Image (cartoon, rainbow, N blue to C red):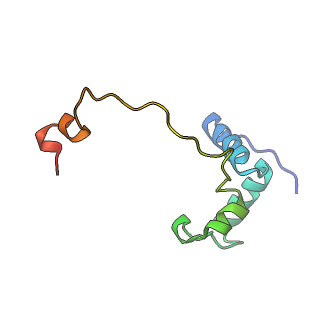
Amino acid sequence: MATNLRLRPAAEAALRERAASTGRSQQELIRDALDRYLGLTEAPPPRSARSLDDLRAQGVLLPARGPSRKVEHRLNLGGKTSIELLDRDDRF
């Protein structure tokens, strides 16, 4: 069935962003959300229960765009450690 759907601007932006980040179409995301809301399919398990392979297959976890790089510059703390820069109450 074809239908028209009017979304609030915030929902439209979020939908576009999610579609781009997961590689899924906006239509697919809307259908999946509606199916879950209506109880036609089971909700996915919480993210903590998903395996890395599942997350990669679903497009939630994307591979790195390139190899990690070595940091060339160090932060100058004026000869002090980061713990010395914290207030006394912030120390553990």
Q: Residue at x 73, y 54 (%)?
A: 29
Q: Residue at x 69, y 61 (%)?
A: 56
- Quarter of the figure with the N terminus: bottom right
Residue nearest the observer in this picture, 74 or 34: 74
Residue nearest the observer in this picture, 81 or 22: 81
Q: Where is residue 43 drawn, in percent x and y?
A: 62, 69
Residue nearest the observer in this picture, 65 or 14: 65
Drawn side of residue 92 relative to residue 55, left or right: left
Q: Where is residue 27 drawn, in percent x and y?
A: 79, 51
Q: Residue at x 62, y 66 (%)?
A: 52
Residue nearest the observer in this picture, 15 or 1: 15
Q: Where is residue 28 drawn, in percent x and y?
A: 78, 55
Mark count: 0
Residue 82, relative to residue 47: is it above or below? Answer: above
Residue 61, relative to residue 18: is it above or below? Answer: below
Q: Where is residue 10 drawn, in percent x and y?
A: 60, 37
Q: Residue furthest left?
A: 88
Residue 55, relative to residue 81: is it above or below? Answer: below
